[in-house]
Amino acid sequence: MSIKQVIMVGFMLFAMFFGAGNLIFPPALGFSSGEYFWTAMIAFVLTGVGLPLLGVIVGSISKAGYKESLKNIHPAFAVGFLVVIYLTIGPFFAIPRTATTAYEMSVVPFLSENTGVWLLIFSLVYFIIVFLLSIKPGTLVNSIGQVLTPLLLIGILLLIVLAAVAYFNNPINPTGDSFVDTSAFSIGFTEGYLTMDAIAAIAFSVLVLNSIRQLGITNRKDLLIGTIKSALLAAVLLAVIYISLGWLANRVDLGGMAVDDQNLGTFLLTFMADDVFGGFGPILLGIIVFLACITTGTGLIVSVSEYFNSLLPKVPYGLWVTVFTLISFGLANQGLDQVIATSVPVLSIIYPIAMTTVVLLILTYFVPSPKLSLQLPVFLVTILSIITVIHRNGWLTMDWLEALPLFSFSFEWIPFLIVGYIVGYLISMNKPKIEYS
């Protein structure tokens, strides 16, 4: 791939990950982390940027992407896992979050009182627009995205540069209470789950492969190298923006202003926009974020509906759009904080499984391995993820889990991945090895 082609595909991938919703997590983490900023933010970048980068790259190992490579674990797992991924980045969490983020940043700053009625009215209008754009997907959404993503990026970069000058000599904000009893690295690492980009990468990877193929590149090795270069560019851009926003929030002086019932991340972004650009700042940021969320929400509805239509072609695409829009509308009316809170236990289960799967696929690319060496660790990590989430949320106490290595860092699944792979390999080392096509 030429440099121009790498930049083109890299910016496309950056635009897919750079949703307005992801902007709210780095400022919130930066503000709360205090003196532990760099530890927490590096951990956040690992899951919010590093894992998506790895996920996209691993998707190019097989010419058919994850849809084919996951069958090496089991055909039923391939379907079931992708269904869970699409529902998570679709109507259950990510799409409702686009609506609630748009509401928090475009409407709430201008309300005298934030009530559920305003959210209901806003989300109704929002999802009517999303539905109309999704029911007949065409070039309109792509055109909007090509205009809005640069506008959002320019606005954020201006905010970062001007705020950095203003806040450079400010003292670091006090460390939040959550960092007293929990490792800063662990908090940052698990906060990165909330971007949902690592699991979105599994769905997006096929789009990257298709884009590179359209450039005339079909050789598997060239596809892999092209994906690595493009994904690295997108990852660098995301990391710079996330760290910069976190750094600003780490030093912003709120002047005693209370956050009230607004999400911390959206409050901080709106406050900094007002601080830097004056009264016009929140208006400009609100308009851009609203339009960007519309684009993201529409793109997700289209992607999820097309995937389920491919699974069950007898169910019309339009019906999938209607069902997923209605589900998203209903869940969005929980409010942004509730949508995020609901997603945390689900993501805490999905992420270790996704990370395990990605690590195993890239490992077996370099070390030909029997299927059992993939199946056993995936099974063990799945069971462990479920029961640890049950324990951590206090739904059922299982104190023995806390004796597991790395439990305090939320990495207790890593030894099970390693041991499961080794045992599975030794048991079936004489069986046929996996080959990617």
Image (cartoon, rainbow, N blue to C red):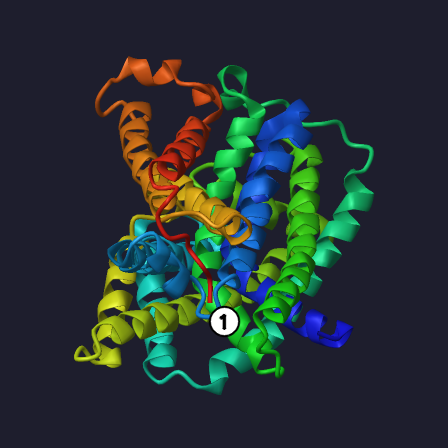
Up/down of 64 relative to 198, above or below: below
Where's residue 49, x and y in %? 59, 49
Depth check, front residue: 318 or 377: 377
Q: Secondary structure at mark 1?
A: helix
Image quarter of residue 402:
top left
User: For the point 34% across and 39% down, which residue is it?
Assistant: 349
Instruction: Return the residue found at the far front.
Output: 430
User: For the point 30% across and 72% down, which residue is it?
Assistant: 305
* Mark 1, other Cα within 10 Å: few <14 / some 14–19 / many ≥20: some
Instruction: Return the residue found at the far left.
Output: 314
Where's residue 30, x and y in %? 62, 35
Considering the image in quadrants, where does the N terminus appear?
A: bottom right
User: For the point 40% across and 54% down, which residue is it?
Assistant: 97
Residue with the mark numbered 1: 207
Depth check, front residue: 113 or 323: 323
Residue 279 visible to the viewer: no
Where's residue 94, x and y in %? 39, 56
Amino acid type of the residue that numbered disc 1 sits on in the rendered structure: Leu
